[in-house]
Image (tube, helix red, strand yellow):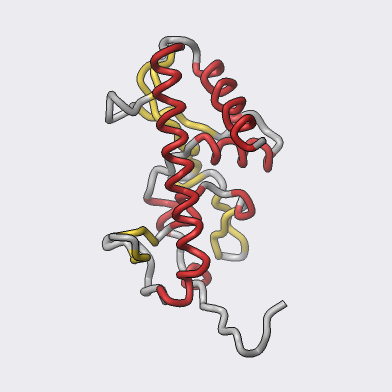
Amino acid sequence: MSSSNQKTPKFPCVDCHTDCCKEYTIFVNAHDVYRLSNGLNSKPETFLELIGAKDYSLGIKVEEGLVDLALKQKNAACEFLEEFDDVFRCTVNDFKPGVCKSYPFEMKNGELSQMSDIMCPTDWDLTGFKEMMVPHLQKDESEWKFYDQLVNEWNLTHAGQPLSEFLKFMLEKVKLCLK
């Protein structure tokens, strides 16, 4: 319930053509995969795509090679982007990846800022979104640190096993973390 005194900021996404969902590869971390898997009631393999890792120290070492995890693409866009009456919208909005929730914001020197190379058709009102985005960006950063540690642990103890084993390992680690 909102009071008449509170001004709800306008989401520029409402007027957007969702270019970010069409142009970017959407990399995901362990918490993203966990939320998507639970929200969709699906195994991660149904929505994940393996991308060759560009950074040897951060890539997942599995039987399939050195990889990173990203969302599958469909029709040159995120597979969860669907068209409704000539407007594209996210079908997993309630549990979409943190990077999608964060876009087009980042933290610079402890302050909320808009990324310099955004695809948005308009600037965002930073003051209107600060209260919502700062905690989210901090949570997202924490989840990526967790994921990096998880990948390092996997690479040290299980490297070369199949991706399916990594996904089980990863989901179990997230479950334990959330308890």
| Residue 34 visible in the picture | yes
Q: Residue 159: x, y in percent?
A: 41, 12
Q: Residue 131: x, y in percent?
A: 50, 69
Give whichever of 58, 67 is nearer the camera. 58
Q: Is residue 14 above or below residue 142?
A: below
Q: Which quarter shows the C terminus?
A: top right
| Residue 118 visible in the picture | no
Instruction: In the displayed orientation, state which residue is furthest to the bottom.
Output: 5
Residue drawn at point x = 53 percent, y = 44 percent: 79
Give whichever of 135, 123 is nearer the camera. 135
Give whichever of 20, 17 is nearer the camera. 20
Q: Is residue 41 left or right of residue 130?
A: right
Q: Is residue 36 left or right of residue 97?
A: right
| Number of marks | 0
Q: Is residue 124 above or below residue 96?
A: below
Residue drawn at point x = 45 percent, y = 50 percent: 99
Q: Is residue 104 left or right of residue 169?
A: left
Residue drawn at point x = 28 percent, y = 30 percent: 54
Q: Is residue 33 above or below residue 136?
A: above
Q: Which quarter shows the N terminus?
A: bottom right
Residue drawn at point x = 43 percent, y = 15 percent: 62
Q: Residue 82: x, y in percent?
A: 58, 53
Give whichever of 17, 177 is nearer the camera. 177
Q: Residue 7: x, y in percent?
A: 56, 84
